[in-house]
Structures are given as C-alpha cells and as structure tokens.
Amino acid sequence: MEKLWVSVCLGGVLTAEILEETNENQVAEIKDRLSSVEGLEEEDEDTELGGGMGGSAIQLPGHEGLQYFATQPSTQTAVAGSTVVLPCRVVNKVGQLQWTKNGFGLGTERELYGFSRYTMIGSDDEGDFSLRIKPVLLEDDAYYQCQVSAGVGIPGIRSPPARLTVYMPPEPPVVIPPKIKTTAGMPVVLECISRGGRPPPEILWIDDSVRNTIQDGNAITTEKMQDGKRVIMTSQLSFTPQRSHHNSTLTCLTSHQALTSPFSK
C-alpha cells in the first residue's frame, strides 16, 4: 500500500487530492488519467499554434508587431522626360510615412502639394506608398528615402537612401568650321562641340571617303555647365586631307545613353 499525491490540471484549473490508501489498480488508473490530460494539453497547444499561422497575415521572424519594409527603394537611372517609380511598401504601418529628397521632407499626403510632379501611388490597405515622378527633370537627380515615424512602443523605420540619377541627352553637335577649303597635304583643325549631355557623350569622327572612323588626332576636352551636372564636350580633330578627300565629308557623330540613335553633323 502506498500514499500518492496527485496534481491534475483540468481546463486550466489545478486540482490536487491526497489518496490515503491506494492499491496498484488505483495507481494505474490515476496514471492513465494523467496521461489523457497531458494529451489534451498537447492537442490544445497544437490547435492554438495552427490557428495563429492560419491568419490573414504571416509575421516574419523578428518582426512580430513591428512595422517593417516589404519593399524599399533602390538606386535607379532615368532619362529626363520619362516616368520613374521608387517603390516603398510597409507592413504593420502605425506611424506617418513621408519621402525625403536629399534629407528634405516632401510631406505625408499622397498628393504632395508643392511638388506637382510627385505622387505617392498605391493603397493604404496594401501599405504601398511608392513615389512616382512624372515627368523626370534634371532637378530630380537626388537621394530619396522612405521614412515611417514611431508609434506607441513601436520604433520608426527608414529605408537606405536611394540615388536617382537623371540622364540628359545632349544637343545636336556643332562643327566649326562647317565647310573648309584647303590644299592636299595641308593640316587643318576641326572642332565638334556637344552641349548639355549627362553623362558626357561619346564623340567620333567619320571619314566618309573611306567610311571609316578617324582614330588619330582627336583631342577631347570636357567642362561642366553652370548647373554642375551637364557638360560641354569639345572634340578637336587635327587632320591632313589628301587628294582622295576632294568634295568628301567628315562627319561628327555623338552617341549617348539618353539617345535612341546618335546625332551626326
């Protein structure tokens, strides 16, 4: 005969009873009761876990209850006159969201008053606050950041700064002098000037008499324009014409990332 202290948790309530005298059959019965209760508790835990995962939103590890970026802006290039979208989508958003340009806040409304070409597109339900710039201008060349302010017990978040680089196509080139009379074997100097490109264009001289690129005697100089971003590029060609060049043409060709086809002059 033995005494046995039994603690049983039923429905979240702990019960205890002292059995003064128990026989072996009673001990076995009590152990069965304990086993069945433990099995029920395991089932309840599994059910609770399953219910949590079956919700409409799945939390990423380490982000439970916190606001975080599902999509962030990244470095982009855009041609002036085009449309660009800088993505920003936030999960569990509780604070106010705004974009900054070179550290300057653009506002918290989707229609960014004072910035007529800027709009935060998307929907609040999806947490999408992507910044659309239409059309892109040279002045949009800057660093952009998506920021969300803090909430009660929830820290604020900021995306890494994303650089938007704006390409500007150059103007058609100008050749100086446009026409020239010379003597075979007499060196001449021609200039081809390309203005306003960003980044600098590539300048080539084509000898139409042989349909070939002139490789030698081409000196390039570059200077920045007043805005500090666009450039004036000058190609100075030292050239010695031959009899075969009589009534022929030398063509200045400028190519650039923002041009669909090169300029020629």
Image (cartoon, rainbow, N blue to C red):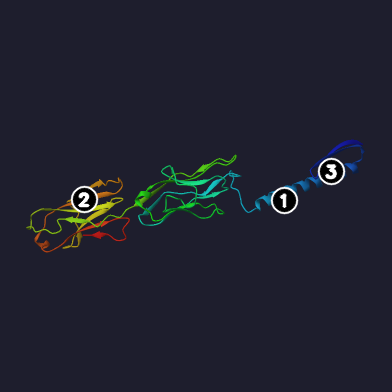
Type of amino acid at the residue the image marks with label 2? Thr
Type of amino acid at the residue the image marks with label 1? Thr
Q: Position of residue 194 (x, y in %)?
A: 24, 53
Q: What element carries label 2?
A: strand
Q: What's the mark number on residue 261?
A: none
Type of amino acid at the residue the image marks with label 3? Lys
Q: Mark 2 points at which residue?
A: 234
Q: In this view, does 208 lie to the left or right of 97?
A: left
Q: What element carries label 1?
A: helix
Q: In this view, does 33 lie to the left or right of 139?
A: right
User: Depth-wise, is mark 1 or mark 3 nearer the camera?
Assistant: 1
Disc 1/disc 3 C-alpha distance (Å): 25 Å
Q: In this view, does 98 lie to the left or right of 186?
A: right
Q: Is mark 3 on a helix, strand or loop?
A: helix
**Crowd around label 3: few <14 · some 14–19 · many ≥20 (10 Å):** few
User: Depth-wise, is mark 2 or mark 3 nearer the camera?
Assistant: 2
Q: Mark 3 points at which residue?
A: 31
Residue at x 67%, y 50% (from the top left corner): 52
Task: Choose the circle earlier in sequence order: 1 or 3.
Answer: 3
Quadrant holding the N terminus: top right
Disc 2/disc 1 C-alpha distance (Å): 75 Å
Q: In this view, does 198 lie to the left or right of 43?
A: left
Disc 2/disc 3 C-alpha distance (Å): 96 Å
Q: Where is residue 112 in the image (x, y as percent from the top left)?
A: 46, 50
Closer to the camera in the image, 91 or 254: 91
Q: Quarter-wise, where is residue 78 in the image? A: bottom left
Q: Name the residue under label 1.
A: 47
